[in-house]
Image (cartoon, rainbow, N blue to C red):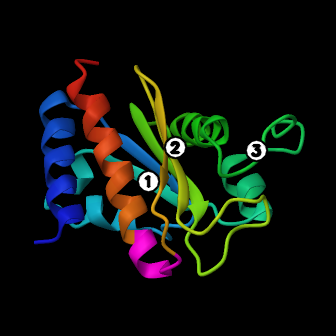
Amino acid sequence: MTVLASLAEKAAARLIARKETIAIAESSTGGLIAAALLAVPGASAYFVGGAVVYTKASRLSLMGITDADMAGLRPSTEPYALLLARRARERIGATWALSETGATGPSGNRYGDAAGHTCVAVAGPVEMAATMETGSAERRANMDAFAVRGMKLLLEVLSAGA
């Protein structure tokens, strides 16, 4: 079993025990977080929905985040990750939402972040965001690392007694 699958099973068990739900809005992980959660038997008890929000067009159409909402923000930051998580939670209608936004590689993003940079956030009764730098330009390895970091943040928030 992979690390991500093991973390998803733990998150699923906590969500089910608490009778809570989750929505996902991810970017550079390309759906890995949602796939890990959906691979756990019984996912319909806690998984409400998700989206890969990879472009400005998808940010607007899927999350309703306008240019006005982005004033003073830029993608791949903790404040943007929190906005994305809050919007996913609101639009999809879940107790919690987990978001991810980053630069997987092999090069950095157009906002000046190096490959291996991501920000993840959880929005719900408790909110938290974190930044991760892998120092690697390996695209697939970064996608996996970013998904694991997001799931660890979710477990951290769920364990905080929220």
Q: Earlier in the sequence, mark 3 or mark 2?
A: 3
72 inside magenta stretch = no
Which secondary structure, mark 3? loop
- Say which label, 2 or 1, has the lower sequence index: 1
**Taking the image as drawn, is residue 42 in sight?**
no
The residues bearing labels 2 and 1 have C-alpha atoms spaced at a distance of: 7 Å
| Mark 3 residue type | Ile
User: Please, is residue 130 above or below residue 31 in the view?
Assistant: above
**Quarter occupied by residue 107:** bottom right
Q: Is residue 28 above or below residue 72?
A: below
Q: Which residues are magenta?
A: 137-143
Q: Kindly check if marks 3 and 2 are in contact, taking CB atoms under 8 A apart as contact.
A: no
Task: Determine which quarter of the picture holds residue 57.
Answer: bottom right
As helix, strand or loop, the secondary structure at mark 2 comes to helix
Residue placed most toward the observer, 16 or 137 = 137
Considering depth in this image, is 29 or 24 the residue closer to the camera? 29
Q: Mark number for residue 66?
A: none
Front-lying residue, 123 or 94: 123
Nearer to us of marks 1 and 3 is 3
Q: Which residue is mark 3?
A: 65
Quarter of the image for the N terminus: give it.
Answer: bottom left
Which residue position is annotated with label 2?
A: 92
Label 3 – label 2 distance at C-alpha: 14 Å
Q: Is residue 72 left or right of residue 116?
A: right
Residue at point 28% right, 64% down? 36
User: Looking at the image, is mark 3 or mark 2 nearer the viewer?
Assistant: 3
Label 3 neighbourhood size at 10 Å, few (<14), some (14-19), many (20+)?
some
Q: First in sequence: mark 1 or mark 3?
A: 1
* Residue with the mark numbered 1: 49
Q: Position of residue 63 (x, y in %)?
A: 67, 48
C-alpha span from label 1 to label 3: 18 Å
